[in-house]
Image (spheres, rainbow, N blue to C red):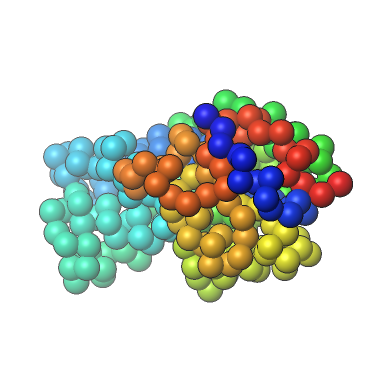
Amino acid sequence: MLTDSIKLNHSPFRAAIIDLDGTMVDTLGDFVVALHHTLLDMGCHAIEVARVDRAFVEMTVGKGTEDLLRRTLAHAWGLPDDDGDVLASVPQAWQHYQHHYTRINGQHADVYPGVAEGLIRLRATGVQLACLTNKPTAFAEQLLTLKGLRGHFAHVFGGDAFARKKPDPLPLLKTCEALGTPPASTLMVGDSSNDAQAAAAAGCGVVLVTYGYNHGHPINEVPALAYIDRLDAPDWSSWFAA
């Protein structure tokens, strides 16, 4: 599916910001494995660990590691995610998670079909690309390098790069500054309402992929310039200024 008639009414873009998890790489397997090891290190029983399955992670991921860990602990323990015991345990869980995620990053993840080709076509338009994700920067750099995608990007910014994360517009505004393009001339490509909300608030256009992690909601309910099944589906040359 490609809905891109709206773009004809938009001025050509001069740069693009691409999300990572759910947009370029399917990382659910990495999250599940790292979270399971983290829960075991936290003393959780097997039945608690089993609650954190792929379906839960798909609904939960996308708002930063601290949010993911808080909600994971709450789900495993059967507590509200603002429970005092949960909140107090997040720093300890983060230490375990960081160790395990660094160790397995990319081992249970796959680049989505069409991503490498799409990035090549985007770069062929002559525009600069930046990767902007809520994943910690070191994890993002490690994953992009492992999957052979790092060379496409002039900049990589993670959820710890700025004071706030998506869906706050600050990360997009700062990334536009790094790219040297105004928000109105910068296109965001993502997979969720987080990306769309951040782009709208920053003044960027947004294109959404149909296969990512949108917290269990249909992606076509989120306003966007286009919805694409593959990153290599659009004629990107018509989207960007020469």
Q: Is residue 163 visible?
A: yes
Residue 159 drawn above or below residue 102 = below
Taking the image as shown, residue 199 lies to the left or right of residue 242, namely left
Instruction: Name the spot of residue 144 as percent of width and height, x first.
Output: 63, 42
Q: Is residue 166 visible?
A: no
Taking the image as shown, residue 199 lies to the left or right of residue 192, namely right
Residue 30 drawn above or below residue 222 = above
Nearest the eye: 223 or 193: 223
Task: Give residue 237's quadrant in the image.
Answer: top right
Give the total of numbered labels. 0
Instruction: Name the spot of residue 222 as percent of width and height, x first.
Output: 43, 50
Residue in the image at 57% along x and 48% along y: 225
Taking the image as shown, residue 224 lies to the left or right of residue 18, namely left
Nearest the eye: 166 or 223: 223
Residue in the image at 69% along x and 45% along y: 8
Nearest the eye: 90 or 5: 5
Instruction: Name the spot of residue 199 as percent of width and height, x first.
Output: 56, 60
Taking the image as shown, residue 166 lies to the left or right of residue 92, namely right
Residue in the image at 36% along x and 38% along y: 33
Residue in the image at 47% along x and 52% along y: 223
List the single residue furthest toward the right: 242
Instruction: Name the spot of residue 15 as percent of width and height, x first.
Output: 74, 53
Residue 174 drawn above or below residue 103 = below
Nearest the eye: 153 or 180: 180
